[in-house]
Structure formats: structure tokens, C-alpha cells
Image (cartoon, rainbow, N blue to C red):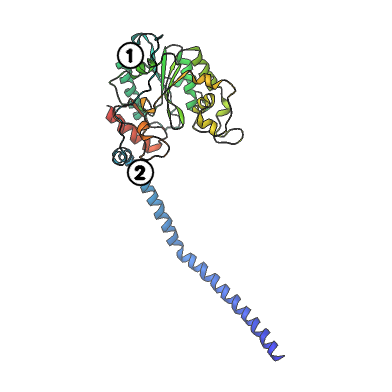
Amino acid sequence: MFAMRRFFNSAYYWRLYENHCSRENQGSWKDRLIQLGPIIIGFLFALYLLYSLFQILYAETYVWQVMDLGNMIQPVARKTCSLPAIPKTKSLSLPSKNKKIAFLMIYDNADGNWNKELMQRVIKNREKYCNLYGFELINGNDQLDHSRPPAWSKLKAMDHYLYKYDYLIYIDMDVIIMNFDRDYINDYIELDTRKDFIMTEDWSGVNTGVWIAKNTPFTHWFLQTAWNQTQLIPRLSPVGIPYPFEYEQRSFHFLLQTKVWQQRHLQVYRGDYKELRNHFLILPQCSMNSYIMYPYYWKGDREVSHYVQGDFLVHFAGKKGKVKTNLMNYFLDVAE
């Protein structure tokens, strides 16, 4: 009986001791957390400063990274852009000097993304090329439709202005013409005068940054049909699949039912997309849509896609903010 009483008394006091230690430990953790608070805040602030510094260094040295460093790590062997061999056909087009051709550009600066001084340099870059070869330069901002993202309006503007010309070249505002020694436009047109569109493709298929359109009923029908694909304006498809690309480029991939479009199991165009493809001449990317690429970029072929001296132009597709601005200023300096 005495042993049992002693056992229960000891168990009772042991529980009291455990509760006391637990309260002491809780109090000590709170105290430690208060003590460590400034250190944790300082550590997080230091991480933020390092990240900000990295972002600045990344942007300010990006040109060196992709050009000098890139050429050391993975130099591009090609010196020119090889075009596909196309069977010679009797040309039904007008002689080069009789064609009425224009470059069209369109952009929206309502959000202040485009630096005014930079845009003036870009326009002068295009005026120089147009003056050399007798082309006109059109600012199609009067065709901007603010009911959807601005890039869609290139379709509307091309359809509107094409009636006045034999051929119209659309060119994005983040494109710099680099080679003024050759009339690339007429050279590409003469490759196959039966085609209504001349475009390039990257690793994802056709790209709408720079392309040539011929004034034909088919071209107008295609541009109007592409504009009317309002179901492609949202970011997601009706079943929740993210659309590839941005804006109007989706409509080209939808109507042509490109490989990347079909791989995502997106909407099927019910017309004869194979017949539509017959109206397109697809050239290598380096012909008029060279990019600036990191070495060993796994998506694309640097030999075909990366800009080298002598290419017609360079397109800064996908670049943002200070990186894009620095690249554009650098290449404008070279081109001037």
C-alpha cells in the first residue's frame, strides 16, 4: 500500500515537472525568436539586395553574354543564310521596279513601354532601308483596335493597307534592319511568285514578327478570317488549356493547324488547312527573323536562329524591359 502511494505521488510530481519544463521551453523559443528576428530580417534583406544586384548586372551585361561570351562558348559557323531550292517557274509578277511595296508597322504606346527616342531611331532605321529600294513606310496606328491586345491589330492594318500595294511587309517594333546592301524583299518575292504569304518559322512554327503579304483575294480572306478568331483572344482555351504564343500569332497556328498547335490538342480548324498551307512560302529563320540566343538554348538551333553579321535583320522576340532596350540600342548603333 505504501509502495503504491509512493508511485502515484512520484508520477504526479513528474507530470508537474514536465509541464513546468514545457512552459520554460516555450518561453525560451519565443525569446530566441525575438532575439533572432533582426538577424532573419537582415538575412532576407541581404538576399533581396543580392537578387536586385544580379538583375541589374544581368541586364547591363546581357549584350556581352549573348554576343561575345556566346560566340566563345558556341560560335555560329554559318556566314550566310541558305535559302531553300525552289523549282523555277515562269514569273507572273510585275518587274521589281514596277511593284508597289511598303513596310507596315503598328504599336501602342499608351502604357509607356516604348521609349520615344528609341522609337525614333527604329523608324529612321526603316526609313533608310525603304529610301534605298523605293519602298514606302506606313505607320498603321490609325487601325489600332483597343477592344483587344494591340498586336491583334496588325491583321486589321495589313488587310486595310494591302489594297493600295502589290506587297506589304509587316515588321514588329522590336526589329532592327542590319544589312542595307541588298533588296531582300524583291529577292524573296521572286523565289516563288505564286505564294500569297512569305514567312519564317522558329522552333515553334511560323512567327508573325516579320512577314510579307501579297495583294490577292486569298490574302485578304485569310487576314479577315484570322482577325475573326475571337475565341483565341483569352489566355486559355474553352477547356482550360493555355494557348501557345501571344495574341494574333495564335490565329495563324490555328488556321494552319501547325505541329505545336496539334500537340496541345487545341481547337481543330474545320476547313482545309492543308490547302491553306499551299499559299505560304516558309523560309529559314535567318532569312528575315534572326533572334538573339543564349548558347546551348535547348529549344532552338543556334546555327539557323541566332543573328550573325550579314543577316538581313534581328528580332528581339521574347526579350523584356531593360534587356530589350539595351539590345535594341546596341544593334542600332551597329546598324547606323
Question: Mark 2 packing: few (<14 Cα in 10 Å), some, or many (20+)?
Answer: some
With 232 as the anchor, is 8 left or right in this view? right
Give the structural element (helix, strand or loop) at label 1: loop
In the rendered image, which residue does mark 1 sit on? Answer: 134
Image height of 274 relative to 66, above or below? above
Spot occupied by residue 134 in the image (x, y as percentages of width and height): 33, 13
Q: Which of marks 1 and 2 is nearer the N terminus?
A: 2
Q: Quick one: 281 or 45, which is closer to the camera?
A: 281
Q: Which amino acid does label 1 sit on?
A: Gly
Q: In this view, does 328 lie above or below 225?
A: below
Q: In this view, does 121 lie above or below 65?
A: above
Residue type for callout 2: Tyr
Circles 1 and 2: CB atoms closer than 8 Å = no
Q: Residues within 10 Å of mark 1 (few under 14, many from 20)?
A: some
Q: Which residue is pictured at 50% across the width and 12% down the height?
A: 217
156 sits to left or right of 310:
right
When asked about the image quadrant of residue 262, the answer is top right
Whole-Å distance between the Cαs marked 1 and 2?
41 Å
For the image, the number of numbered tags is: 2
Q: Which quadrant of the view contains residue 269?
A: top right
The C terminus is located in which quarter? Answer: top left
Point out the image quarter for the N terminus: bottom right
The dot on residue 222 is none
Q: Which of 189 and 16 is in front in this view?
A: 189
Give coordinates of residue 156: x percent, y percent: 49, 20
**Residue position for label 2:** 58
Whole-percent x, y for residue 16 in the image: 62, 79
Q: Which residue lies furthest to the bottom in this view?
A: 2
Q: Residue furthest right?
A: 1
Q: Determine whether the residue tagged by mark 2 lies in a helix, strand or loop.
A: helix
Q: Where is residue 10 in the image (x, y as percent from the top left)?
A: 64, 84
As drawn, is 322 to the left or to the right of 23?
left
